[in-house]
Amino acid sequence: MTEVILSEQKKTKRQTKYRIDKDGAGLVFAMIEQSTEIVNGIDLSVPNLTEPPRVTLGEPPAHLTVACVWWGDLYGVEYVERLRDAVARNLSIPYDFVCLTDHDVPDGVFKIIPPKVGPGWWQKVGLFRLFGARILYLDLNNVIVGSLDEVVRAQEPFCMAENFLSKGFAAHNSSVMLWTPTDRTYRIFTRFDDKVLDELHGDQDWIWRVMGDDIVNFCPHHVVSYKLECKKIVVQGPDGPKVFTHMDDTTSILVFHGKPKPHEVEDELIVDNWR
């Protein structure tokens, strides 16, 4: 059972440190956003921080929409191309590949121009006004290293990655999401307004506030942080050091949050799969 302890000494203007005692491990949730605001009926205070359930696996959907968001100038078109190609190598069920963007897209990608809801990652909010069936969302900087078929076998209506280690600002991470549209998921878009930008750190904080306990996390090894959860071994060779990464055999997606980005890494695992 997960016990939530609020540390009064760690309060700042808008953030509070939470400690989650997870099986006695004392896992720390750091810098959870604090707000007393209610925006369009959505309470922005911190939701229940009990340990979320994991997905159950069943039959994959007959068809899937795979979506990404390409907004601004942080990434070039090669990120869209390489994600498109990685999905093609690792997903066996029929799917459409769509990109929410105002850029020109490469072949094999359906372009959707979303309404501008905010800067950067906030454009993900626009995902939830679209589509009519099962959707798999992937951040552009994810690296696909294994079959996605296992990931999309999740049966629950709304699935997200569990946020990594100290959790940062939220219990869940929106780098990988799988959902079936419902009236509640539609609220992620319809209840959003600019006041949320002032109160919360990012889209995953808002999604957590709207969806609450309906969020289920993927299997632990299916979605993994490259930076925080992969073991790196550096071996000195005649041509200099080489990095080798150890991960679970069931890992499908490596998440590149923060730095480094995939194009900055010489790890053979990334070079072989980010193409």
Image (tube, rainbow, N blue to C red):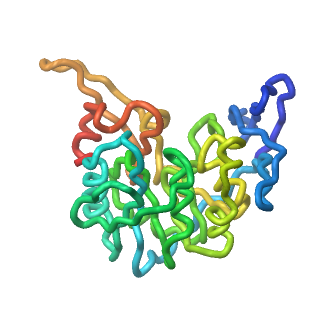
Left or right of 180 in this view: 246: left
Q: How many marks?
A: 0
Left or right of 29 in this view: 35: right
In the foreground, 38 or 21: 38
Question: Can you tell which quarter of the image residue 74 is in?
Answer: top left
Location of residue 178 with respect to 236 vertically, above or below: below
Seen at 38% across and 31% down, the residue is 260
Q: Position of residue 167 (x, y in %)?
A: 63, 39
Q: Position of residue 212 (x, y in %)?
A: 72, 58
In the foreground, 238 or 264: 264
Seen at 51% across and 78% down, the residue is 132
Residue at the limit of the structure toward the right, as seen here: 8
Q: Position of residue 107 (x, y in %)?
A: 21, 64
Seen at 27% across and 49% down, the residue is 77
Residue at the limit of the structure toward the bottom, as seen here: 62
* Res 28 seen here: no
Q: Position of residue 4 (x, y in %)?
A: 81, 41
* Res 202 seen here: yes
Seen at 70% across and 59% down, the residue is 210
